[in-house]
Image (cartoon, rainbow, N blue to C red):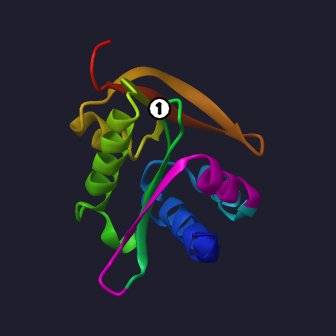
Amino acid sequence: MPDDIDELKQLYFDTIVIVNKKDYTEEQVQAWASTAYRTDGLLKRIDEQYFFVAENDDKKIIGFASLAKTGYLDLLYVHKYFQRTGVAKRLLQKVINTATELNISRLETDASITAKPFFEKHNFTTIRQQTVTISNIDLINYKMERILYSC
């Protein structure tokens, strides 16, 4: 997977600047997208989290997700040309299955304005709206959770 780091970073960047631009200002999109090229952070997630990649028939990466051992759904990005095709749903199901195998009872994520309806559709509830600051630019997102089972 580290061999695919450039492809992963490009997908991350393109998703932000193409898909999320409908819900965020140009300034916010550029600040957020600037985080896409932090190779060390992505490699650390690949190494330390459960990291899932979706590929098309041509073995091109069309989405990825990561799950921390704590139940935090850290990343879920889908290629700009594969939005609304079931890729995110399949990645989320892989995350849920892995969390269940690990006896994680609750998933938590920080969802963008764009992603919030997807998570709501998949039984996540909003805990709170929050402001995240990247390069001195404020962005709104949502702390969300999904209870997988009661302890």
For the residue pair 129 and 69, the one nearer the viewer reads as 69
Q: Nearest the camera: 144 or 74?
A: 74
Quadrant where the image shows the C terminus: top left
Q: Please name the residue shown 63% across and 47% down the image.
A: 48
Specify whether residue 48 is painted magenta. yes
Residue position marked by numbered label 1 in the rendering: 71
Please tell me whether residue 8 is drawn above or below residue 20 in the rendered image: below
Residue that sits furthest to the top in the current view: 151
Question: How many residues crowd mark 1 within 10 Å: few (<14), some (14–19), many (20+)?
Answer: many
Q: Looking at the image, which residue sits at the far bottom?
A: 58
Q: Position of residue 85 (x, y in %)?
A: 23, 65
User: 98 left or right of 3?
Assistant: left
Image location of residue 132, percent across then percent down: 63, 34
User: Could you tell me which residue is drawn at 48 percent across and 63 percent down?
Assistant: 15
* Relative image position of residue 104 (x, y in whole percent): 40, 28
Magenta residues span 40-58
Position of 88 compared to 35: left or right?
Answer: left
- Residue displayed at 56% across by 76% down: 7
Q: Position of residue 148 (x, y in %)?
A: 29, 26
Label 1: which secondary element? loop
Answer with the quarter of the image where residue 127 lies: top left
Locate the N terminus by quadrant: bottom right
Say which amino acid is labelled 1.
Gly
Queried whether the magenta region covers residue 56, the answer comes back as yes
Residue at the (54%, 39%) spot, across then down: 68
The quarter of the displayed image where residue 34 is located: bottom right
Left or right: 150 as drawn, with respect to 144: left
